[in-house]
């Protein structure tokens, strides 16, 4: 007997072929290249950094932003610098 604890009444079961759920990443271009060819993240570019921060003010994960590990560390440092310089808020202003 299939009750609410066991998947709910007469509903059809999902196929097992959809085993892994795909996640579409926004692929935000976070890094810039200097004249020397060095990659960096500019802490003064607040429009790009806002895309890399959640609504609550948390830095988004690599899975969500689509950047590699080295770029994610640069993003975290740039967000922290922008917060310290009062270019980005530490938390959102939810009233």
Image (cartoon, rainbow, N blue to C red):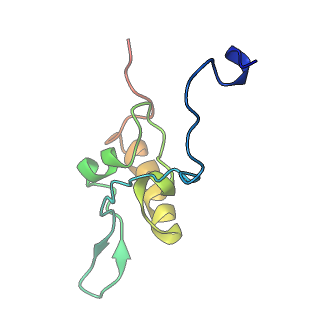
Residue at 30 percent across and 86 percent down: it is: 37
Extreme residue toward the right, this view: 1
The residue located at (36%, 71%) in the rendering is: 40
Residue 22 image point, x, y percent? 47, 53
Q: Is residue 42 left or right of residue 70?
A: left
**Percent x, y for residue 89?**
38, 34
Which corner quadrant holds the N terminus? Answer: top right
> Which quadrant of the rendered structure holds the C terminus?
top left
Image side of residue 84 versus residue 47, left or right: right
Q: How many marks?
A: 0
Between residue 95 and residue 43, name the one nearer to us: 95
Whether residue 8 is situated above or below residue 17 in the rendered picture: above
Q: Is residue 71 above or below residue 51?
A: below
Residue situated in front as seen by the camera: 2 or 31: 2
- As drawn, which residue projects farthest toward the bottom? 36
Q: Position of residue 6 (x, y in %)?
A: 72, 23
Q: Residue at x 72, y 18 (%)?
A: 5
**Between residues 91 and 81, which one lies in front from this camera angle?**
91
Q: Where is residue 57 drawn, in percent x and y? A: 44, 35
12 relative to 85, above or below: above
Q: Residue at horizontal 24%, vertical 48%?
A: 47
Q: Nearer the viewer, residue 65 or 83?
A: 65
């Amino acid at each position: 007997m299939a009750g609410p604890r066991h998947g709910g009444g007469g509903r059809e079961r999902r196929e097992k072929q959809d085993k892994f759920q795909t996640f579409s990443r926004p692929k935000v271009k976070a890094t810039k290249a200097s004249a020397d060819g060095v990659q960096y993240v500019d802490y003064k570019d607040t429009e790009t950094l806002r895309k890399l921060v959640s609504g609550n003010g948390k830095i988004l994960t690599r899975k969500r932003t689509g950047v590699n590990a080295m770029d994610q560390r640069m993003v975290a440092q740039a967000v922290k610098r922008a917060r310290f310089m009062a270019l980005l808020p530490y938390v959102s202003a939810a009233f």
